[in-house]
Image (cartoon, rainbow, N blue to C red):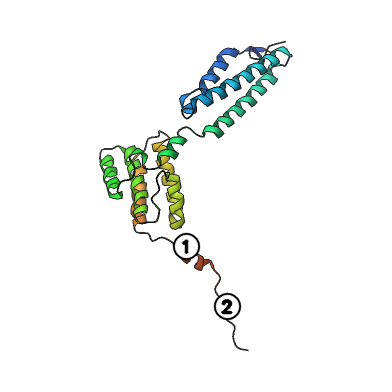
Amino acid sequence: MPIWGDRLLAAGSAPVTVPRDPARDAARDELLKADYHKNDPTVLERVVGWIWDHIDRAMGSISGDGTDGTTGLVLFLVVAVVIGAALWWRLGPPKRAARTVLGVYGTEGPRSADRYRAEAAGHAAAGRWSEAVREQMRALVRALEERTLLDARPGRTADEAAAEAGRALPEHAAALAAAARTFDDVAYGERTADQAAYQLLLDLDRTLERTRPVLAHASAAAAAPAPTTGGAA
């Protein structure tokens, strides 16, 4: 009877050798990457240790009770999915904490919209598109704060700013959400930007400058049914 982790039975019943220790070590290394435990390494190391203790016990019981390789593989995959879901729920996507704590303006705090625009234009002129995208998004959000369409709130993320601004400027809500996603991809997702991404943000910023907000009482009045008048009999 093959031992799970050492041999698996292929579809044609031929044994396939799969070393258990290298696979286990690779999975352990993945779980201990810095992105997963930079927030609270002490707690996470304890969690990872607890998980691996239970996996080792499960491996021992599978090896000793005659469970075939296919069943063992299924059990391992189930455990892997549970571990991944638990880590995602506990820590979220990598860099989520930095995005939440720093907000759209980063560590330096807000400056004027015109200054952000000038810095974005300077980066664009030099072909530094990722930097241009970051500064142009900050200019866009700061301009909305200066117009009091957004309250000035430390730590606000680009997603939050886009959602709040979209309520005051509903016809541009989708464009604002797309701009926030572009900013997050570049600032936190380590993706590179191009001229087209910068130009979209620049055009949106200019468009929003010419757009008047939809006031809450005006939209409520528009949604209310028109009063009916009765004629004389």
Q: Is residue 10 visible?
A: no
Quadrant where the N terminus lies? top right
Write down the quadrant of residue 208 in the picture: bottom left
CA–CA distance between discs 2 and 1? 24 Å
Q: Which residue is mark 2?
A: 228
- Closer to the camera, 182 or 135? 135
Query: Which structural element holds mark 2?
Result: loop
Relative to residue 187, is residue 2 drawn left or right? right
Write down the quadrant of residue 110 in the picture: top left
Q: Mark 2, residues whose alpha carbon is within 10 Å: few (<14), some, or many (≥20)? A: few
Q: Tell me, yes or no, whether the two marked residues, 2 and 1, touch with CB atoms within 8 Å.
A: no
Give the amino acid type for the residue marked by disc 2 in the picture: Thr
Outermost residue on the right side: it is 65
Q: Which mark is residue 15?
A: none
Sequence-first tag of 2 and 1: 1
Relative to residue 117, is residue 153 drawn left or right? right
Relative to residue 65, is residue 76 drawn left or right? left
Q: Residue at x 62, y 18 (%)?
A: 53
Q: Which residue is mark 1?
A: 216
